[in-house]
Image (cartoon, helix red, strand yellow):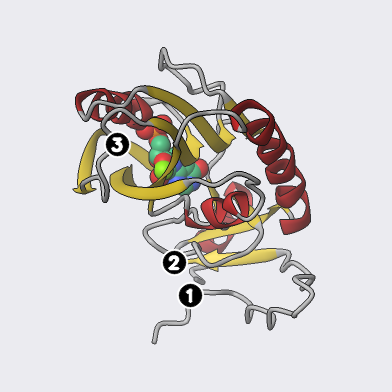
């Protein structure tokens, strides 16, 4: 197995309270701690509260997790939803390395029909908005009655979409991040905290040729 983490991931405590690693190395890139799991959960709590208020009387809501990046947010959010609801998934991909490829591939179609349903989309991060615009088209074609958008993170400085994100948990600058479901070339998704690309450290390591 390749050793891509700079430090050993601490054992996950039963109290969910493992101390966050300060730095992580994934392939050629160094990352530093940006948001702890505790801070993330506070934001998830707030979004869940708003959704619980807005949708408690909604007819037959269905939550749609956008794979792969949203799996941790989806799990923590759904544990906080206080009304009966269904769930389904779709898998889209647009990123290559640390930037968007500009086109969205549908890797796995909707796992359930959403025709006539009130859909709540659960996304990991909205960056340029390309993915969410394509998703909106897919959901309208599939006959959704209404569509609401939640996203753990949004980069307002990069957003070029025309869709309103109804439930953004956290706004961040245009930096590249990993952890809590988000990846750099498929690695880093299992980190419970969120890390931001450390450009200086990455360059330093490159110049002295260590990974
Ligand atoms: P968009 O289509 O440009 O809005 O990008 C959205 C998708 O790109 C997200 O669902 C993620 O999968 C990926 N993405 C955007 N920003 C980041 C990031 O900072 N780290 C990891 N993945 C990202
Ligand atoms: Mg996503």
- Position of residue 108 in the picture relative to residue 10 (left or right): left
Q: Which residue is mark 1?
A: 4
Q: Earlier in the sequence, mark 2 or mark 1?
A: 1
- Position of residue 166 in the picture relative to residue 90 (left or right): right
User: Which quarter of the figure is the N terminus placed in?
Assistant: bottom left
Count of all numbered marks drawn on residues in the image: 3
- For label 2, being within 8 Å of ligand 1 is answered no
Q: State the residue at coordinates (67%, 64%).
A: 23
- Position of residue 90 in the picture relative to residue 118 (left or right): left
Q: Which label is found at residue 72?
A: none
Residue 161 location, quadrant: top left
Q: Which label is found at residue 27?
A: 2
| Above or below 113: residue 7 | below
Q: Which mark lies nearer to you, 2 or 3? A: 3
- Position of residue 178 in the picture relative to residue 98 (left or right): right
Q: Position of residue 57 (x, y in %)?
A: 59, 29
Q: Secondary structure at mark 1?
A: loop
Q: State the residue at coordinates (72%, 41%).
A: 43
Q: Earlier in the sequence, mark 2 or mark 3?
A: 2
Q: State the residue at coordinates (51%, 71%).
A: 210
Characterize the local packing of mark 1: few (<14), some (14-19) or many (20 or more) Cα atoms within 10 angstroms: some
Q: Which residue is mark 3?
A: 114
Q: Are marks 2 and 3 in contact (CB under 8 Å)?
A: no
Q: Which mark lies nearer to you, 1 or 3? A: 3
């Amino acid at each position: 197995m390749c050793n891509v983490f700079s430090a050993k991931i601490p054992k996950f405590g039963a109290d969910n309270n493992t101390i966050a690693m300060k730095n992580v190395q994934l392939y050629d890139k160094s990352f530093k701690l940006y948001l702890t799991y505790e801070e993330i959960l506070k934001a998830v709590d707030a979004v869940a509260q708003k959704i619980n208020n807005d949708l408690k009387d909604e007819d037959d809501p269905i939550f749609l997790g956008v794979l792969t990046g949203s799996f941790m947010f989806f799990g923590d959010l759904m544990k906080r939803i206080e009304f009966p609801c269904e769930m389904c998934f779709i898998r889209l991909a647009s990123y290559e390395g640390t930037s968007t490829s500009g086109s969205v591939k549908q890797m796995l179609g909707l796992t359930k029909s959403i025709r006539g349903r009130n859909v709540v989309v659960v996304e990991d991060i909205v960056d340029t908005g390309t993915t969410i615009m394509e998703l909106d088209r897919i959901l309208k074609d599939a006959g959704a009655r209404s569509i609401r958008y939640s996203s753990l993170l949004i980069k307002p400085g990069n957003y070029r979409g025309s869709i309103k994100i109804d439930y953004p948990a956290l706004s961040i600058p245009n930096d590249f991040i990993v952890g809590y479901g988000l990846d750099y070339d498929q690695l880093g998704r299992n980190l419970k905290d969120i890390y931001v690309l450390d450009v200086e450290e990455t360059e330093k390591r490159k110049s002295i040729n260590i990974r």
